[in-house]
Image (cartoon, coloured by chain):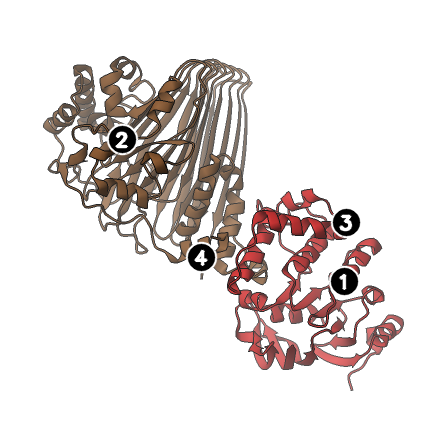
Chain colours: A brown, B red
Amino acid sequence: MSESVVIQAALTQEYPHGFETKVASHTFAPGLSEEVVRAISAKKQEPEFLLNWRLKAYRHWLTLPEPNWSALDIAPIDYNQIIYYSAPESLENRPKSLDEVDPELLKTYEKLGIPLHERAKLAGVAVDAVFDSVSVATTFKDKLADAGVIFCPFSEAVQRYPELIEQYLGSVVPFSDNFFAALNSAVFSDGSFVYIPEGVRCPMELSTYFRINTPQIGQFERTLIIAEAGSYVSYLEGCTAPMRTDHQLHAAVVELVALEKAQIKYATVQNWYPGNKQGQGGIYNFVTKRGICKGHGSRISWTQIETGSAITWKYPSVILKGNDTHGEFYSVALTNNYQQADTGTKMIHIGKNTKSTVISKGISAGHGINTFRGMVRGAPSADGAVNFTQCDSLLLGPQCAAHTYPNIEIGNQSVHVAHEASTSRVSEAQLFYCQQRGMSEEEAVSLIVSGFCKTVFQKLPLEFAVEAQKLLEVSLEGAVG
Amino acid sequence: MLQIENLQVSADSKMILQGLSMQVNPGEVHAIMGPNGSGKTTFSQVLAGQYGYTIEQGSAQFLGQDLLTMPPEERARAGLFLAFQYPVVIPGLNNLYFLRQAINSIRASQQLPPMDAGECLQTAKQYLGELGLDESFLSRNLHEGFSGGEKKRNEMLQMMMLSPKLAILDETDSGLDVDALKTVAKVVNDMRTSDRAFIVITHYQRLLDYIKPDYVHILSGGQIVQSGGPELAQTVEKQGYVNIRSE
């Protein structure tokens, strides 16, 4: 299919992932209590340390007020109306192979373009597929095991590698970090676990695909990636959900640990259901993501393409603890219709000669509101630290808005910080030029936007750069005219 | 191919074109000359469908279709090409990618299969040589950091790739040195065929030394005040526009 045909198809369709899978599930009644926390832990047959950790988190969460410091317009969330656990029956007893998995589930992933069957696997990419509260399957496990790489559902890692979980869980994002991190720590149900041994370059891209299916459910997944000295891993997560008129909460926590000279590249293509054109429904995507460059010379990069969710509220951050470490953040956030995004990053420079790069591209269309919020902190110990921040906003139409809040806290004279920002509109002259060359207005807008986002798209693994481009086109539907 | 009858156009309630008529047949090259503010650029923009103009009266038929009611992309797909006087910058947009999008948008409208990236690159490379450009030109961002001459050459490259039925060159010669001017002229001359027409808008006679028009029209005050053969351009060159009067 030609790109223009693809684009046309993409532009004329509504949110394409909005279907629901009918599958027999074990679902908890809505509501949150210590009993629910215990019940989730029991479902997962967790060791005692983990149950205790969850309970501490839950008790701490009870003491916290809901944060309200952002400029987001959030309808009240009733935490007792949320379902905290739902798992398809066919997955309850850890299926040994895909033959034991309900075919409806497999079809779901086929429809989403993420085939899980061996014969149709996404070439070169190992996938862990999370459906509501549990993992459906993880592909290429054996091939990865040959390289010594562990890539498995979080709940499986708890069983098989409890010592790693105990050592690292909460080491980057403690349960006390914030309201949603505390909630997640109490009730998280699944997610992915990655461990790259010393000196190993992970032989393929790793990817987790998150799917919310059950109405009223909150998805609280947890991802932990540990890269030992001298190792390398590139990881990508994707997310979709059915179309519903109620809001649904997704509050994940992601922790990355990079030891000496290790490199972690973490990319997100976030396409949660954004709500309809009137702003009804859609996912509340309130996520805490943080990595620590613990060892000397290590490197962590966050790349995110945020096109979905009614509200996105997240700041993937890097603690640059080791000397000569490098943190990167590349972001494209698009808000259309009544979507709101408050996103950015924190770069915490502690080690000497640490470096951080922040490139943010915000696109606002319709009544969308897009906020970049960033922090660069240079600790007194951060001799010679350097930050570069570039933050560009593109506006489509007169009703949307873009805001930029860069915060800089420097406790060391030798830290160098540079910040560039721009705001532009798609001009009529640009549109007309493209149209005079035969393109429709929608094609023109998507071309102009893709040019605007290019520096970020280039940071995505190749397979997903195309995906990201298509996603933007779908998300821009109705943004012109 | 193109019949324009009594075209009257205003912008911001100011009349710019005041009853313009002309006929262009396949195979012809028409030159439109005129002083600053005579309506030359408005004329080209209105034909291409630029926003912000009001058609007060008159009509324009292009290959049997009512041109003035067609959206700009439909006009382009029908074979009308405008080489812009000031091509816009689109930051970050790869030049070759843009070119292929344009080709494939037009091809899709004609139910033709898309041109793949390799074929597009090969075709473009062939033309680059004629334009005195190297391949790196294609990987640059659309008009970002282009010199005036490079922008005009890029317009010519697009024209060659899109192979229109009617090409309107809006002061493509302005700001070009003589070598670039000869290059542009050679492109046009090579593309002159019995089924393709050109409207060459220019302020100076200079370009017409290299592109021999079939007709020359003098535009003044939003009207064609005089039409003739190539010799009319010589007259303008000698006498200036002030001595050319409407009857």
Q: Counting residues from the N terminus, which is met first, the one under dot 3 or under dot 1?
A: 3
Labels 3 and 4 share a subunit:
no
Please state the chain letter of the residue tagged with numbered disc 2 in the rendered image: A
Labels 1 and 2 share a subunit:
no
Callout 4 secondary element:
helix
For the residues labelled 2 and 4, say whether their Cβ atoms are less than 8 Å apart. no
Left/right of residue B204 with respect to residue B158 in the rendered view:
right
Mark 2, residue position: A221
- Which image quarter: residue B204? bottom right
Please state the chain letter of the residue tagged with numbered disc 1 in the rendered image: B
Of residues B181 and B109, the one nearer the viewer is B109
The image quadrant where one finds the N terminus of chain B is bottom right
Callout 3 secondary element:
loop
Q: Amino acid at mark 2?
A: Glu
Left/right of residue A189 with respect to residue A381 in the rendered view:
left
Residue A54, placed above or below residue B10? above
Residue B190, placed above or below residue B25? above
Residue A289 place in picture, x, y as percent: 35, 28
Q: Amino acid at mark 4?
A: Gln
Labels 3 and 1 share a subunit:
yes
**Cα–Cα span, label 2 and label 3:** 57 Å
Residue A418, placed above or below residue A46? below
Please state the chain letter of the residue tagged with numbered disc 4 in the rendered image: A
